[in-house]
Amino acid sequence: MDRANVVIIGGGVVGCAIAAAVSKSIADVFVLEAMPRVGMGASTRNSGVIHSGLYYTTGSLKARHCVRGNQLTVEFCAAHRVPHRRTGKLVVATNEKEAEQLPALVEKGRANGVEGLRIVDAAGIRAREPHIAGGAAIEVPSTGIVLSEELVKAYARVAAGQGASIVTHAKVMRLEPSNDCARITSEAGEIEARCVVNSAGLFADEVAALLKPATCSLHPATYKIYPVRGDYCEVVKPKAHLVNALVYPLPHPDHLSLGVHFTRTLWDTFLVGPTARYIEDKNDYESNPEPVEEFARRAKLMLPAIEAADLRPAHSGIRAKLVPPGGKGSADFIIERDASFPRIIHLVGIESPGLTSAPSIAEQVSAMIAETLG
Ligand SMILES: Cc1cc2nc3c(=O)[nH]c(=O)nc-3n(C[C@H](O)[C@H](O)[C@H](O)COP(=O)(O)OP(=O)(O)OC[C@H]3O[C@@H](n4cnc5c(N)ncnc54)[C@H](O)[C@@H]3O)c2cc1C
């Protein structure tokens, strides 16, 4: 049986970033990924935005990791030739009531350490985005875009270059911890590890539950992830000039999403979306897609020139939410040791801004791993 210092379950952006960080100084690091390639989950089914950290509760893991992750992601992309661009973004108020909320959002962003925020008026909006309707907006210069597939691949490449093993087709099915190690059974075989990181994204709750037999009612599952799907449309080329960079509405009060927004892509179109809808099945990327007309209706609030005929359905992604349907507020990332088996570190509810936060999360988890290994 193989022996590892560290086994990371899940080869998404978070697992690969952790592997890249930890394999700098630790040998025998393995990533076990269920799918044929790394990054086939949420990590490549998203908006590809390098977020600034504007929205999140000050002091939360989301705020801290997003602000630091923004800087680290841009540095990493530059160093490893990952296509990215610091486009900046506008958060647009479409009426007076929304405009009144902008100063508080700016204050929150500043408290989180987001630099360069300022409020612009309608003329300021038009100077950047001539086709966008709105009376006032927050200009966020640190926001950018990245090719998420290339980002995940680059983290995996760096990890592999430092000696880490990235094993695909390796769905983890059993976890048997003991005092000084854990035995992990995957489709690729068995391995023992001194430290295990559960970064299985949407399935992190199910991986954590492998430690507690479901048949035992004395041990209810510790975590529960509620899948929330987001669908996108893409604007066809002749109308791609209607948006220059990133344009967001104010965040939706239900905390489900940041609202249907416009995201310039690195292939010179723009995305409209994502929507937000609780679903039953974590693998359901396709059933009952939102009609294109509905995208156009919502998009018109900020972009009156857009028509349904300008849009075509694009990809969808599934958020790993910790708040159940009908629940209030938003939840922070969970990054903690298992209560019974401290050699196992769980990362749960790593929803947006997880793509941005990945290298900062990797710093935190690397420190926890170093502490475990002594
Ligand atoms: C619609 C949408 C838009 C988003 N937009 C943005 C954005 O613009 N900017 C941003 O910063 N964030 C964004 N996010 C959030 C971001 O995509 C995620 O936070 C991030 O990708 C999470 O990465 P991960 O590695 O934790 O999860 P994943 O990418 O889901 O990776 C988890 C991996 O674990 C594997 N796995 C699962 N179970 C097992 C098992 N038993 N054994 C082995 N492997 C297993 C899966 O196959 C998967 O590859 C968005 C998310 C969504 C859904």
Image (tube, rainbow, N blue to C red):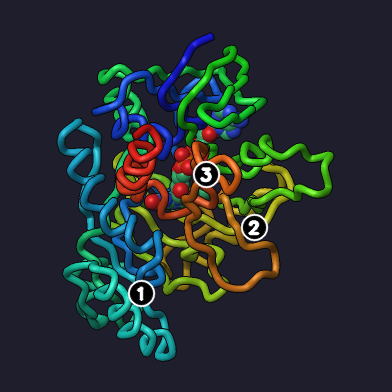
Contact, CB < 8 Å: mark 3 with mark 1?
A: no
Which of the 4 image quarters holds residue 83? top left
Residue linked to disc 2? 277
> Element type at marker 3?
strand
Q: Residue at x 16, y 38 (%)?
A: 78
| Residue at 48% over, 36% down | 197
Asked if residue 316 lies left or right of residue 238, the reply is right
Residue depicted at 21% across the width and 46% down the height: 74
**Dot 1: element:** strand
Q: How many numbered circles are shown?
A: 3
* Picture disc at residue 92: 1
Q: How crowded is mark 3: few (under 14 residues within 10 Å), some or many (20 or more)?
A: many
Where does the image place residue 215, in percent across and percent down from the top left? 84, 39
Q: Nearer the viewer, residue 282 or 34?
A: 34
Asked if residue 114 is positioned above or below residue 333 in the image, the reply reads below
Mark 3 = which residue?
A: 346
Per the model, the C-alpha gap separating discs 2 and 1 is: 23 Å
Q: Earlier in the sequence, mark 2 or mark 1?
A: 1
Label 2–label 3 contact, CB within 8 A: no
One can see residue 41 in this view: no
Please state which of residues 117 and 64 is positioned toward the viewer in this rendering: 64
